[in-house]
Amino acid sequence: MATIGLEVVDAALVAARDGVLVATSPGVALLDPQGLLVGEAAVAAARLKPVLAADRFWADLATDSQVQTAGPAFSHADLAHAHLSLLWDSIGRPDEQVVLAVPGTMRLQQIGLALGIAKSIAMPVAGVVDAAVAACADLPAHATVLHLDIHLHQAVLTQMQGANMLRRSRVEIAPRVGIKAVHGTWAQLISEAMVRRTRFDPLHQASSEQQLYQRLPDWLVALATHESIDVAIDADARTFMATLRREQFALAAEAYYAQLIDLVHTGRRAGEAATLVLSSRAAALPALRERLAALPDLELVTLPNTAPAAAAAARIGEFDPDEPPALATALQRRHAVTAGQGSQRTGAACPTHVILNGRAHAIDERPLLLGLGDGPGRRLALSGSLAGVSRSHCTLLRRDGIAVVRDHSRYGSFVNGERVDGEAVLDVGDRLRLGTPGIVLDLVAVA
């Protein structure tokens, strides 16, 4: 009997057969009074009728959650049923079994509901596996593996460990860092660039906004291999264009990227060698891979978009056909672990400067106070309105050959994603975040 792997995540349903992509259906529905649309058809009209669009039905899967739109009333389970049914009608075969790959954020009751929906549409599910574990268990990697994925509404880091069995140990999320939010930021970036060049605002009317969002994924693909791209929108029998650089996209998304980097830091102990695996969705964010590659003690791997689904299908033999489908969060590794030792924090790696807006400020025996506004003493004033940053937020200084940060704030100072409890030692390469999302500062050594 043939097997198909199906990744179920709020961004899309992704199906693979024999390792080859057979379908991708976005997790969007349009509750049009003239007929429910799901997947690509819904995406094609979501910006034209935004009050009728729904995109949380997989993230918040439940039978008692009513979708709030101006159209007919549906539960999230109703929309998930329509979405899965449409996909299965287009790709299903009578002799085929399915293995579902689900994110670590999907609760057991939601998995049970998804299995019930699959049964109602005659989709024969043989098993369910954690998507990150499935995608990473076949990789030659360190004993500690981190999988970073970005969903439609949040980013998810799955920590896995084990020399022989790769086992999910914990799941961390960044709740405001999703594809929808990041794409919204980039849509605004493109709109502002086009207004400056042509005085035309593509976000001012629904049809041009729809164009922008539909073309944005292709522009992001182009940025993977080009330093700049030309973006074009057709409206009023004219074509409006603007040129943007990859750096502009990265800078616009800095607050999101900082949270993703913090998420990676929370997934491992300082100095621990680990493999960081990026989903295809995370790898599609311009310049993020380069940012993550600069982190110490991390081996970086990028997955194709079929990885979770294809790997799940390949594990069909590990599920008992006589038992109900069960969730697997640990799988046998198919490669020996990669040897490697993490670097240790030492006084020799003491930072000498903190970087703010491209300028280096010395860290020495004289306390350097960081915060909003001006004040007496040696002070680094952070301009603008920064959420969670205090007027006197923290102090940097060198003491006995080491650099330390002292936190004075209400909302916290964070070193590599870990909140400072009073005082913490700093090392070269550390990232100091003030507040949430706040501002991120790099620590360097200057000879």
Image: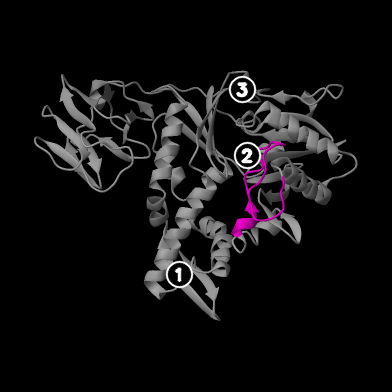
Q: Earlier in the sequence, mark 3 or mark 1?
A: 3
Q: Say which residue appears at 54% left-offset and 76% top-offset.
A: 235
- Outermost residue, bottom direction? 237
- Outermost residue, right direction? 94
Q: Name the side, left or right, on which 33 lies relative to 362.
A: right
In the image, residue 116 lies in the stretch drawn in magenta: no
Disc 3 to disc 1, C-alpha distance: 50 Å
Residue 361 locus on image (x, y percent): 17, 39
Q: Nearer the viewer, residue 425 or 74?
A: 74
Residue 29 locus on image (x, y percent): 68, 52
Q: Earlier in the sequence, mark 2 or mark 3?
A: 2
Secondary structure under badge 1?
loop
The answer to which quarter of the image holds residue 307 is top right
Q: Name the side, left or right, on which 337 lies relative to 109.
A: left
Q: Residues within 10 Å of mark 2 (few under 14, many from 20)?
A: many
Q: Say which residue appears at 69% left-offset and 34% top-offset.
A: 101
Secondary structure under badge 2?
loop
Residue 166's mark?
3
Per the image, the residue denoted by label 1 is 201
Q: Nearer the viewer, residue 63 or 121?
A: 63
Residue 240 in the image: above or below residue 69: below
Residue 97 visible in the snapshot? no
Do tag 2 and tag 3 residues touch (Cβ < 8 Å)? no
Of marks 3 and 1, the one in the foreground: 1
Q: Name the side, left or right, on which 403 lies relative to 42.
A: left
Q: Nearer the viewer, residue 280 or 113?
A: 113
Per the image, the residue denoted by label 2 is 59
Q: Residues within 10 Å of mark 1 (few under 14, many from 20)?
A: some
Which region shows up in magenta?
Answer: 50-74
